[in-house]
Image: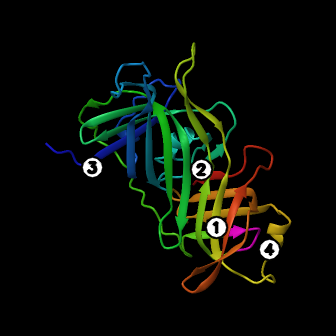
Amino acid sequence: MELSKKKAVIIAAVEGVYGADATPDGSNAIGVTDLKISPAKGTAKKRAIMYPDHSTQPHIITQQHQEVSLTVELKGGGAAGTVPECGPILRACMMSETIDPGVDVVYQLISDSYESCTIYVNQDGILHKLTGCRGTFKINGAAGDYPTMSFTLLALAVAPVDLAPVVPVYTTVAPLEINSSNTTFALGGFAALLHKLDLDPGVAVKYRELVNSSAQIIITGRDCKGSLTFDAIKNIDHNFWADWSASTPLVMALTHGATTGNIVEINAPKVQLASVDYGDADNTLTFNTPIALTRNTGDDEFTLTFK
């Protein structure tokens, strides 16, 4: 019988010990789109034995691991101080989680004590267990659409099995359109007319297995960057050309949502413009600006807050 690509259940939980199955259940369900799982990642090493013919030689698969990519809606947890659906995966992407009950949940970049998560991907009765997951993500937001987060993670090798999916319990929180009613944005204190924001912490991960060391996905660093598109303005309003020329660090702040339980904030204390180029949107002149999100006191290139 054929299997459906659309029938999938994804659940995730933070691991207490690296690589140890965190056994997520239906209450850990995450609503995702653009799911792609690659359970057979590795290197096919051909043997090079000399034979009296030109026959193709067999190979051995080395460095076996898995990869998964998925997109989630960027939205709140439903109540102030409630962890969002994507919380366990964020913690596997070089970020700490700080919960202030009844107030907010803050995710901030870290440089040690990295966590990991277990993700179960069940595709129409085929269960893939991804343990030891670590990776990176991108935040994508455009006016007229709702914001999303796209994750790419590596995981340890675990063979898939046939198993019926658990019953998932999804949040009832709906994403909000990025518009003037739901969203505020400022760059360098100027309320720019924002078309699009992309943010990429650039977390670098690698599969590693050495003698006398268990296989693991290691985090090797990060390079926070992104891009902005907003209506072009004259220098009298704000001189972004001067900011670029002087490599001036700018405070960037975005708040999306106005109702407690579905408010998301992105704050970056020192954003630098890599360039200021012209673009066009609806026959309106825009500034297209690649950005670098840089350190202030350390591990604070940006914070992601759910209220």
Rendered residue at 51%/56% (across/down): 261
Give residue 5's mark: 3
Sequence order check, earlier mark of 2 and 4: 2
Q: Which residue is mark 2?
A: 104
Q: Which mark is residue 228?
A: 1
Overall secondary structure of the magenta section = loop
The amino acid pointed to by label 1 is Leu
Q: Position of residue 249 (x, y in %)?
A: 80, 60
Q: Is residue 226 left or right of residue 208?
A: right
Furthest toward the left, the residue is: 1
In the rendered structure, which disc, 4 or 1, sits on the residue that comes first in sequence?
1
- Of the numbered discs 2 and 3, the one sitting upstream in the chain is 3
Segment tinted magenta in the rendering: 186-191
Mark linked to residue 201: none
Please state, as top left, top right, bottom left or bottom right, where the N terminus lies in the image: top left
Q: Nearer the viewer, mark 2 or mark 4?
A: 4
Identify the mark at residue 241; answer none if there is no mark.
4
- Color scheme of the displayed model: rainbow
Which residue type does callout 3 highlight?
A: Lys
Image x and y of residue 129, in percent: 38, 32
Judged from this view, the residue extending furthest toward the front is 52
Q: Position of residue 284 (x, y in %)?
A: 60, 85
Q: Callout 1: few (<14), some (14-19), or many (20+) C-alpha neighbours within 10 Å? A: many
Task: Tell me if residue 277 comes above or below residue 19 in the rendering.
Answer: below
User: Residue 9 location, x and y as percent?
Assistant: 32, 43
Q: Is residue 113 visible?
A: yes
> Which residue is at a point 34% across and 34% down the rendered structure image?
128
**Which residue type does callout 2 highlight?**
Asp
Q: Amino acid at mark 4?
A: Trp
Q: Quadrant of residue 66?
A: top left
First along the sequence among labels 2 and 1: 2
Between residue 57 and residue 24, name the one nearer to us: 57
